[in-house]
Amino acid sequence: YASTAYQAWLRYEKLPAELAEAYVQLCSKIYAAGNVAEDPVLRSAQEELLEGLQAMLGQQPELTDTAGDAALLAGTLDEPEIAGLIDKDEAAKVDEEGYLLHTVISGGSRKLVIAGTTSKGVLYGVFHFLRILQTRGRIDNLSVIENPANKLRMINHWDNMDGSIERGYAGESIFYRDHAFIEDLSRIRDYARLMAAVQLNAVVINNVNVHETETKLITKEFLPQVARVAEVFRAYGIRLYLSINFAAPIQAGGLETADPLDPQVRRWWQDRAKEIYEHVPDFGGFLVKADSEHRPGPFTYGRDHADGANMLAEALEPYGGIVIWRCFVYNCMQDWRDRSTDRAKAAYDHFRPLDGRFHERVILQIKNGPMDFQVREPVSPLFGGLTRTNQMLELQITQEYTGQQIHLCYLVPQWKEVVDFDTYAAGEGSTVARTVSGELFNRPLGGFAGVANIGNDENWTGHLLAQANFYGYGRLAWKPTLTSEEITDEWVRITFGHDPQVVETISRMLLESWSIYENYTAPLGVGWMVNPGHHYGPNVDGYEYSRWGTYHFADCHGIGVDRTVKTGTGYTAQYHEPHASRYESLEECPDELLLFFHHVPYTHVLHSGKTVIQHIYDTHFEGVEQAAELVERWRSLEGKIDAERYESVLERLLEQAEHAKEWRDVINTYFYRKSGIADQHGRKIY
Ligand code: GCW
């Protein structure tokens, strides 16, 4: 696996000689403070630093035992050789996981210091430093201090122990095969490096839908194996978590109930916790999908989510573990004829009444939107609905509804809209970013969770350009104030080099891809219209008469879901002002969300000046042209990108361009037949 695609953002391309020369003076002699031999995180930092520098500068840096001889010093801030070079006030600004990169003058010579409060900070500092070289920044006058915005920066794997991945589009699991752990952990180590490079610090290694074998991950049968994997991640500052089955006391413990208030059940979980921590002393905790899509939960026993989550939190508390409880709870057995139930309202309705009842060590994990990772949704109103509960934002890096890593759909711009969304929960400036970081309501815990898009494909993500989604997710979780453009530019340079045409072309392809995908798929925020089950490809009525609560209500007059208070489901009332009124109002509702909030005739005129039906036709014709242009834009880079990566991306773009036509024709034909209204431009509709 030495290929460029495999190395992803750790490929450390050799720098041109002039540049290497400029860097080499500060990089050739290194002093690594602290007990590197016994601290696995410091060891990872040192290895990475040496490997990265050697590869980029083309010469082996020298490690020296004498701090005074070194030009580059790395270590924790409490090491005397480091402390001596750094101003105390500056050092005090560095948090537990933070770091500083400072260029200082000492004894008449220039030195560069990479320092953290903890070893993890040193590791992150090293990765940041290497990133500066990868992006060809200057290092002779560095004065960087970085602290994470979020305590938890987590990846959720939906991997099953049979090796499959739920909603995985890049091969099989890197953790399991045939109901067992994969023996060789080297790929997991490479993955941990990729995670640490973007400063992610937590990983859940099994699917939230916990099946039979996985239920036993928290028992003796598998804990020794879990411990091996945890050790690999630990060396990169990443804590391991497990998804649990709420009915495990019955299914793995032989009890007759899983009632969270039953003393025997409570004892069973306490015993599990004790055993887990004997194997994994820094175990992170549990992720729980309960009473959701047929998963067991406290409802069976007449208890609520707080009873369930708190019971688990109390079991983990003595060891420092936490419980992450998902809010993806709704009625998945709805009758499509029932117009009073609105799935979008469910999370808020379930969890808002419980605000303040959760244990300090419970975090509620909330999907970005109220439905399910559609190409366009409003932001979940639950973020503005909780003030006395730890919260976490769940994003889907894997492209379940956004082209399944065959289509290019770079999601960072979408995520930016989410994190920047102002809930107004505590007046202006109450953004989702500040809510989930814990800052807004002074909560002890919080952060980001992203559903992984990686598998055992050689290039990790199937579509090579989908690596950018993983990279961007990590960067945003660390620093949500970064712009999409900054993240994109960084990733493209690191991945494809610095040729201006390459950087410009790929950056623009990425940044425009979400809107292109939206153009030829479900219009104006209405969502779905996919084939049931696997969710790939167009099927306008695929979910229209199903139990899942995901309807568009198109008929010969109009389309959309009336979620207003006045005439609809009343969902808009879950928002604070000014959103509640803005979404409620047909005049003020933003075009891109119109059909999420309102049922309108096809002739309704949008802010854009077009009717809804003409908008549908235009965007679908345009989306197909744009998808074809993506191919041409990529082709313009032939010869500037190694053949292997060039061909693999080209293949996917061609498939996307073809499949976009299928979307266009299915959607346009459907609405032409429903509405009977012709395209103003007389284009071909079937
Ligand atoms: O998006 C839906 C997916 C399910 C998933 C579920 C969830 C893991 O279609 O595959 O289950 O959401 O988030 O729990």
Image (cartoon, rainbow, N blue to C red):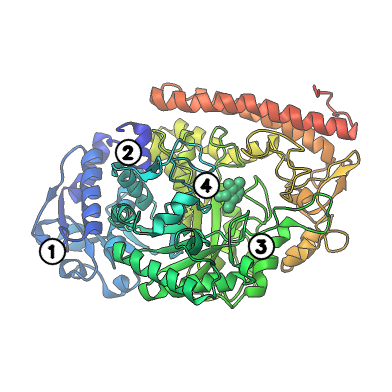
Mark 2 residue type: Arg
Q: Are marks 4 and 2 in contact (CB under 8 Å)?
A: no
Q: Secondary structure at mark 2?
A: loop
- Which dot, 3 or 4, sits closer to the camera? 3
Of the two numbered discs 1 and 4 on the same chain, state the one appearing first in sequence. 1
Quadrant where the N terminus lies?
A: top left
Image point (66%, 29%), residue name: 660
The quadrant in which residue 536 appears is top right
Q: Is the residue marked by circle 2 packed among few (<14), some (14-19), or many (20+) residues within 10 Å?
A: some
Disc 4 and disc 2: Cα gap in Å? 22 Å
Q: Identify which residue is drawn at 57% across, 58% down.
A: 419
Query: Considering the numbered disc 1 on the image, is that residue within a helix, a strand or a loop?
Result: loop
For the residues bearing labels 3 and 1, Cβ distance under 8 angstroms: no
211, 495: nearer the viewer: 211
Nearest the eye: 58 or 24: 58
Q: CA distance from mark 1 to mark 4?
A: 49 Å
Q: Which mark is residue 107?
A: 1
Instruction: Give, as a three-letter code, the residue at label 3.
Output: Ala
Residue at mark 3: 347
Residue 449, x across and y down, in percent: 50, 56
Figure quadrant of residue 672:
top right
Viewer-nearest of discs 1 and 2: 2
Spatial CA distance of label 1 from label 2 is 35 Å
Q: Is mark 2 within 8 Å of ligand 1?
A: no
Residue 11 is labelled as 2
Please say if the residues under marks 1 and 4 sit with CB atoms less than 8 Å apart.
no
Amino acid type shown at disc 4: Ile
* Residue 438 to residue 396: above or below: below
